[in-house]
Amino acid sequence: MQKFILRNFTLIRTLIAIALGIVISIFLIYVISETPGFSLKSFLIAPLLSKSRLSNIVENATPILFCGIAIAVAFRAKQFNIGAEGALFISAAVGTAFAVSTSMPIFIHIPLVLLVAAGAGAAWGFIPGFMKAKWGASELVASLMMNYVAYFLGLYLINNFFRDKEAGFLVSYRLPESARLAQFLEGTRMHYGVFLALGAALLIYYLMFHTTLGYEIRMTGHNQGFSRFGGIKIFKIIILVQVIEGALAGMGGMTEIMGIHGRFNWQMSPGYGWEGIIVAIIGREHPILIIFASFFLAYIRVGGQSLNLLADVPFELVTVIQAVIIILITAEAFLGRFKYKLTVNEAKREEAGDESLA
Amino acid sequence: MAAILEVKNIEKIYPDGVIANKDVSVSVEEGTIHAIVGENGAGKSTLMKVIFGITRPQNGTISFQGQEVNFKSPDDAIQQGIGMVHQHLMLASDLTVAENLVLGIEPKRRGIFLDDHEMIRLTREVAQRFSLEVPPDKKIKDLPIGIRQRVEILKALYRKAELLILDEPTAVLTPQETEVLFRTLKQLKANGKTILFISHKLREVKEIADRVTVMRDSQVITTEDAAKLSEEDISHLMVGRDIRTERIPQSETTGEVVLETKGLSFVNEDEIFVLKDVSFSVRAGEILGLAGVEGNGQTELVKLLTGLLQPTDGEIFVRSKAISGLSPRKVREIGLAHIPEDRMENGVADQASVKENLIVDRYYKAPYSRRSRLLWKTITDHTLDLVKRFHILTRNVDTPVNSLSGGNIQKVVVARELSADPDVLIASQPTRGVDVGSEEHIHSLLRQVRDEGKAVFMVSADLDEVLKLSSRILVIYNGEIVAHIPDPSMVSAEDLGPYMLGVKRQEDLGAEIHS
Ligand SMILES: Nc1ncnc2c1ncn2[C@@H]1O[C@H](COP(=O)(O)OP(=O)(O)OP(=O)(O)O)[C@@H](O)[C@H]1O
Ligand SMILES: [Mg+2]
């Protein structure tokens, strides 16, 4: 039993953290809500019961997952580029611009639009990457500032050149049908983008742990002196991880436009890039764990919306509950002492076993 | 005399389940120099960390100056008058020597502003008082490891340590520096301070220690008066068997020139000539040893040779092919391997596993990867093989390197570089921090490399090592080659001293060095 707990400690700890977070949320809901039972149901159960909410979770998780793995790649190399949000926004704008100005058969158009968006994101990531590699400029600051640039540049591009004047809002022209990702379930907005995201996560997992490039990225993150010494081109890695980050985030933005809205309609930056940071951390920068983290975060986000919509709990509180859960999960030391005790017991037992054999 | 430190029944189990101290009891008398010896991984550093409050034991008690203590952190230990110099130095590398020395207790002007002049003055004063010379305004990262260590010692002394713990202080020092350190330690002892130190060099232990504690397999085997034990006794107690020191004769056959430098100069960021017109060559089948007090350009020379720095002037040739301007990868592919002087700085990625650390120079080649795909099975087998061949003590191949003992981390580096099967081996402090047995083992491996007709360029602070292994010796002082000893069997450590200290130099070295 002890051995089993030790071996799966991280997983168990995460589950306990989630459970604890939920208990705390239950407590908060009981304090605040007039109809706690109903509120609780809207928060935790409702998202799983209706088709439309379930699909909301999937829709939401898609761009978050793209951004999460994007950020994980850069973080693994200790490059703290937090520009996924900007890359996502600018790529969606550029990709939209490309999509509405071209027409092609669908099986070429879709990949090409995605490629253009990814390219835009990659270029966006290249800038802080290059400035870091060449001049040692902080990628954190550069990418943060570039998020603002991306926002205004993206809006400028859409509003001035691709704005659909017939629509009542500030939106772009509709994407041609050949550039739309199909929705695969009648009555929902779930689209094939989610499979692209899952595919990308698996691909990045493979890249990070089973390829030479992944090895170079991880070693550069551990110790640059060591990597250089071993012959790894750190200059290349520093730029490349940020290019990959930008490209993945860009795909995330574009699939959302292609699958859900059908046109560029963001007047605000959607924030997936920030949620991506959260899931990258919850998922310990591991692509597979980030898949679960993304769906989990989407689940509590959707639960929060329904809690706010159906019950009498304000959205602010929802945010608090989410924060509690996230903090518990990310706390490294949480239950650390417990684990240590188990290890010590186990070691002593083994030791005693050894001696009795000898 | 009373015991200043009384350690009783310490048991320490690390979070990964390794039992590093088992029922360890030691009593250290006030005003003595007490040595702790044992093989790599015996648990010495762990015991020191427990005493200093870095890590907490599962069981056992510690009394200091008659009081039972329970340090929650090193700060508590420092407060009570314990100082420690770690096996892997822990200075802030972007700060200057003076800033490091006073870190946390800086002199202030009007209570707020750092007083730079006072800081530097204090540093000079402390340095002089303990006769440990350091450059107060240099950044730590620009200093060789030997000087960094002095700064650490000064730092502890400056904090008025009554008990000074030194974890392998002499591993990074030249004999001259060691002598200076020992004089300092004796002086400290005369002033009533107590010193607890770890060393793998038994001669030193005999020379300076009053008492010796021998550890083996996480346990204390015995504590004795140093005078009562011979070096042989100690090593016997350490390993539980005798160590054979085998003498392998110098190889006679040297071949063509493999590594050659011509007029190598290097000017550092402060626009100082760290290396001046360095020319030499190394032939196949010989070990060229470079002797010198640390900080005389050895670090930079090695970095130039391995492509980690580019020369300001001059050229380096491997088999007549110019290599300056090439990347470290290219340099390695030409057939150069490199054991770096500071294993933690670039020898290992300490959070990565043993497995990942052993492939950094070869992961992209067959059989370790195919078309960019890492072949983990092959890598694991390769690692298991090296762990066995080089006697690396590790729980398994996925253990992160930072859970290995210092000597075992060194073995990881040596294992990787020697198994690269290089044409030219640049070995900087190849046996730093390894125990007597492993030192013998690494020495015989270096000789084997030589006998296979490879060229070895070895830099070592350990003169005995240089004298024992080298086919020829160069002495470096202040960035210049000042002596060439074609036949090391004719000289002793004392003969090299004057060259190393710059009081003597040979003229007309030019042609001869390339002999
Ligand atoms: N942080 C750690 N986590 C897990 N195991 C550790 C850790 N530090 C040391 N160990 C293990 O504890 C044992 C004792 O290590 P320790 O560093 O005390 O050895 P040592 O006697 O100082 O050896 P050396 O002469 O090589 O420095 C080793 O088996 C080592 O692998
Ligand atoms: Mg040690």
Image (spheres, rainbow, N blue to C red):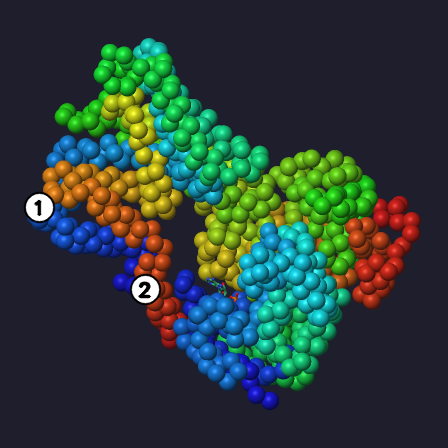
B453 on left or right of A139? right
Image mark 2: chain: A
Percent x, y of residue A198: 31, 34
Label 2 CB less than 8 angstroms from ligand 1: no
Check disc 2 and report the residue beneath it: A338
Image mark 1: chain: A
Q: Residue furthest right?
A: B508
A6 or B188, nearer to the observer? B188
In the image, what residue type sits under mark 2?
A: Phe
Percent x, y of residue A296: 25, 42
Percent x, y of residue A202: 35, 36
Q: Is residue A241 shown to the viewer in this render?
A: no
First in residue order: circle 2 vs circle 1: 1
A101 on left or right of B199? left
In the image, what residue type sits under mark 1?
A: Phe
| Residue at point 70%, 73% (across, down) | B184
Check disc 1 and report the residue beneath it: A38
